[in-house]
Image (spheres, rainbow, N blue to C red):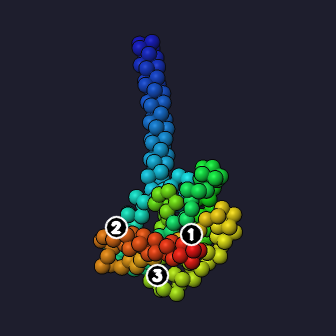
Amino acid sequence: MHIGVFLMCFCFIKILHQRRSLIDSLNTQVTTARTLEGVLSRQALQDELTGLLNRRSLFRRFDEMAINHQRGMLAYIDIDNFKQVNDRLGHSRGDELLVITANSLLKTAPLGSRSYRIGGDEFIVLLPSDDQQMCEEWISELYDITKNIRDEYSIGISIGIAPYYPGNLSDPDSILTQADKAMYTDKNNKNKEKA
């Protein structure tokens, strides 16, 4: 009888130990899965090189702004002669320039703004106000803070501005197209001044 009780207790303890090991293993797997989920979520919404938000995140933001009936200005920024930087100095220096540009945007953007890298050498800044003077002051500050970099790399920065408001937030492509056209107008005007 004592041997039977002993065997039963031994089996019970062994089952409890295995159960505890299984629970610990499951907790570890859940923690790992949550960590991986966070990493994947960041990768899905954030540009790996610059740390800025990406195009997918921009379109999510458009949806949020439409729901909240927000208004402001969208700045479309392009680095002029970026290809020549990669060709002359190498891609690592081109990447360095992209990171410097991203940091300049973060440093100068007004409170409440959001900065995005939407591809290649193109960036977007959503300014939370439709105040034209505030926008012009920000552009001036951005030009000032990037002067040495522009000189060092022999690049320019072209910027196009388009307003966003509740009536056009349902069509973010039209806002981007308007800002893109304004950016090319800025780029062409600079080229005419050089000629």
The residue shown at (34%, 67%) is 173
Which residue matches tag 2?
A: 173
Q: Earlier in the sequence, mark 1 or mark 2?
A: 1
On residue 146, the disc is none
Q: Position of residue 83 (x, y in %)?
A: 55, 56
Q: Earlier in the sequence, mark 1 or mark 3?
A: 3
Asked whether, in this view, residue 5 is left or right of residue 51, the answer is: left
Q: Quadrant of the N terminus?
A: top left
Q: Position of residue 41 (x, y in %)?
A: 44, 52
In terms of depth relative to the viewer, which is nearer, 75 or 182? Answer: 182
Q: Position of residue 75 (x, y in %)?
A: 47, 73
Do we see residue 134 in this rendering? yes
Nearer mark to the viewer, of 3 and 2 = 2
Dot 2 surroundings within 10 Å: few (below 14), some, or many (20 or more)? Answer: few
On residue 129, the disc is 3
Whole-number angstrom distance, CA of label 3 to CA of label 2: 20 Å
Asked whether, in this view, residue 105 is left or right of residue 71, the answer is: right
- Please, what is the three-letter code of the amino acid marked with disc 1? Ile
- Please, what is the three-letter code of the amino acid marked with disc 2? Asp
Q: Position of residue 52 (x, y in %)?
A: 52, 60
Nearer mark to the viewer, of 1 and 3 = 1
Q: Mark 2 falls on what kind of element?
A: helix
Q: Earlier in the sequence, mark 3 or mark 2?
A: 3
Which residue matches tag 1?
A: 157
